[in-house]
Amino acid sequence: MGMVDISKKPEVEREAVAEGTIFLKPETIKLIKEDRIEKGDVLQISSVCILNAVKKTPELVPFCHPIPIESIKSEFEIGEAYIKVRVKVKSTSKTGVEMEALSGVLNALLNIWDLVKKYEKDSSGNYPFTKIDAVRVISKVKHE
């Protein structure tokens, strides 16, 4: 067991885009849009969480190689009952950046859930509507 040997691979420009969605109550989405979430600005906090997660991916995913991150871009799409998070990561390295993009997406989604959980719970303390879904890599490019 161990990390894959990438020592013979050339460094090339690579990018990956990942996305995922969190489904929330329409009332919670309204609070987010009106910046009335008690813990703070949900999208701003989630943007910082994306940066942290992308840079810390090798600490979270043990077989992931540490690579130089050259660019991180994030987008949020807010619907009536969902927020979609999209993260694009670029690096010039010997290995891809899809784990970094996925880590950014997942960490943003988890943080959104954490920030709004007070508003999502039902009377028994459960989350019958809240759901993270469709986390995936939507593109991966290697520029040789």
Image (spheres, rainbow, N blue to C red):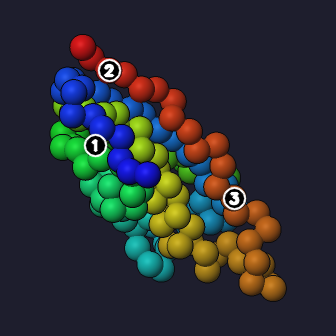
Quadrant showing the C terminus: top left
Disc 1 marks which residue?
Answer: 72
As drawn, the residue found furthest toward the top would be: 144
Instruction: Please name the amino acid that badge 2 sits on.
Output: Lys
Q: Residues within 10 Å of mark 3 (few under 14, many from 20)?
A: few
The tag earlier along the polypeptide, 3 or 2, is: 3
Instruction: Please name the amino acid that badge 1 sits on.
Output: Ile
- Can you tell which of label 3 and label 2 is closer to the viewer? 2
Helix, strand or loop for disc 3: strand
Judge by depth and name the residue closer to the eye, 128 or 134.
134
Question: Horizontal and vertical percent for residue 123?
Answer: 80, 85
Quick check: marks 1 and 2 in contact, CB under 8 Å? no
Between the residue at mark 3 and the residue at mark 2, the CA separation in whole angstroms equals 32 Å
Quick check: marks 3 and 1 in contact, CB under 8 Å? no
Disc 2 marks which residue?
Answer: 142
The tag earlier along the polypeptide, 3 or 1, is: 1
- Tally the marks: 3
Q: Is residue 93 above or below residue 142?
A: below
Between the residue at mark 1 and the residue at mark 2, the CA separation in whole angstroms equals 16 Å
For the point 32% across and 20% down, the residue is 142
For the point 36% across and 40% down, the residue is 4
User: Residue 88 falls in which quadrant of the image?
Assistant: top left
Disc 3 marks which residue?
Answer: 131
Question: Horizontal and vertical percent for residue 50?
Answer: 36, 55
- Can you tell which of label 1 and label 2 is closer to the viewer? 2
126 with respect to 71 (left or right) = right
Q: Taking the image as drawn, is residue 137 in sight?
A: yes
50 with respect to 25 (left or right) = left
Q: Is residue 127 above or below residue 105?
A: below
Q: Is residue 134 above or below residue 45?
A: above
Question: Horizontal and vertical percent for residue 122?
Answer: 77, 78
